[in-house]
Amino acid sequence: MTKTLFVGNLPWSATEDDLTRAFSQHGEVIAARVATDRDTGRSRGFGFVEVPEEYAEAMIAAMNGADMGGRPLTVNEARPREDRPRRY
């Protein structure tokens, strides 16, 4: 089983490789992606890291508040889309 972690407050320059490198220090990373703006292609300041379930809690504990590019990361388990309120 895998879990997807939400990673917020990313530096604008962060790449998927940066996320993978940072999180792989604490366990296996299956995939990482940085959310980008549809029109400009620029980072939206958050991303997602997919990890095996057994590493999820340790990674959240280790990376929540960790510094990346001078910014403290916000890391928690991602909620499924249907659980989020819609913005209009």
Image (tube, helix red, strand yellow):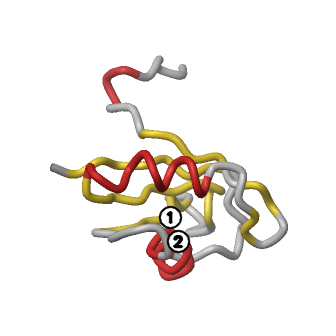
Badge 2 or badge 1: first in the primary sequence: 2
* Residue at x 55% of width, y 52% of height: 7
79 relative to 12, above or below: above
Q: Position of residue 24 (x, y in %)?
A: 44, 74
Location of residue 52 in the rendering, given as x and y in whole percent from the top left corner: 25, 57
Residue 29 falls left or right of residue 88: left
**Residue type, label 2:** Leu
At 56% from the left and 79% from the top, the residue drawn is: 18
Nearer the viewer's eye, disc 2 or disc 1? 2
For image coordinates 77% across by 55% down, the residue present is 72
Quarter placement of the C terminus: top right
- For label 2, count other residues whose C-alpha is less than 10 Å away and answer few (under 14), some (14-19) or many (20+): many
| Kind of residue at badge 1 | Val
Specify few, some or many for label 1: CA neighbours under 10 Å numbering under 14, 14-19, or 20 or more. Answer: many
What is the distance, in whole Å, between disc 2 and disc 1 at their CAs? Answer: 8 Å
Residues marked 2 and 1 touching at CB (< 8 Å): yes
Indicate whether 12 appears above or below 79. below
Which residue is labeled 1 in the image?
34
Instruction: Please name whichever residue, 86 or 27, is drawn nearer the observer in this view of the structure.
Output: 27
Front-most of residues 69 and 12: 69
Element carrying mark 2: helix
Task: Please name the residue that numbered disc 2 is placed on.
Answer: 19
